[in-house]
Image: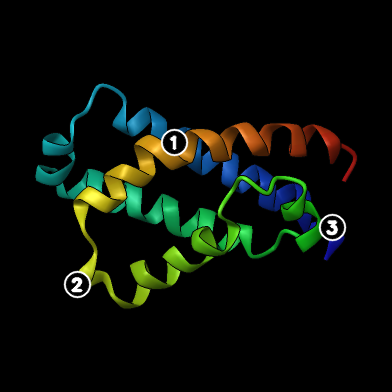
């Protein structure tokens, strides 16, 4: 399991960076009206969700301000209950939850640079 930590952290950071790039300068209305943007962002969040599941609990506990269980769970919603996904909720995740996640992941990557 330990050997999967760095690739999982890298996958999270890559997905967050991609979402940031894709949504830069966009509004909720832009997001809602662009099928490709919506689905690309949702896929990025799915990747983040799956990668978070690979992080050991002690690593997650080192950043208690991050809602790890909710991050892991949103992937299931996106995959299995896609008909209930709200653009407003996803946009809120992008705007308010991904920046703190990124801030938490960067020092984790630095700490696991040899793995």
Q: CA distance from mark 2 to mark 3?
A: 36 Å
Query: Which residue lies under the disc numbered 3?
Result: 3
| Mark 1 nearby-residue class (10 Å; few <14, some 14–19, many ≥20) | some
Which residue shows up at 21% across the image and 70% down it?
84
| Mark 3 nearby-residue class (10 Å; few <14, some 14–19, many ≥20) | few
Label 2 residue SS: helix
Which residue shows up at 25% across the image and 21% down it?
25
Tags 1 and 2 touching, CB below 8 Å: no
Label 1 residue SS: helix
Q: Is 71 rendered above or below residue 7?
A: below
Q: Position of residue 50 (x, y in %)?
A: 56, 63
Q: Is 59 rendered above or below residue 75?
A: above
| Mark 2 nearby-residue class (10 Å; few <14, some 14–19, many ≥20) | few
Task: Indicate left or right for 30 with 63 as reference.
Answer: left
Q: CA distance from mark 1 to mark 2?
A: 24 Å
Query: Which residue lies under the disc numbered 2?
Result: 83
Mark identifier at residue 18: 1
């Amino acid at each position: 399991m330990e050997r999967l930590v760095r690739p999982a952290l890298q996958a999270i950071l890559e997905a967050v960076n991609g979402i940031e790039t894709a949504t830069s300068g966009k509004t909720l209305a832009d997001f809602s009206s662009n099928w490709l943007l919506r689905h690309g962002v949702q896929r990025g969040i799915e990747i983040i969700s799956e990668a978070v599941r690979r992080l050991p609990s002690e690593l997650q506990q080192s950043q208690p301000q991050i809602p790890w269980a909710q991050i892991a769970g949103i992937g299931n919603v996106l995959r299995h209950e896609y008909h209930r996904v709200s653009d407003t909720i996803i946009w809120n995740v992008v705007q308010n939850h991904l920046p703190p996640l990124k801030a938490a992941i960067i020092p984790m990557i630095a700490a696991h640079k040899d793995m």
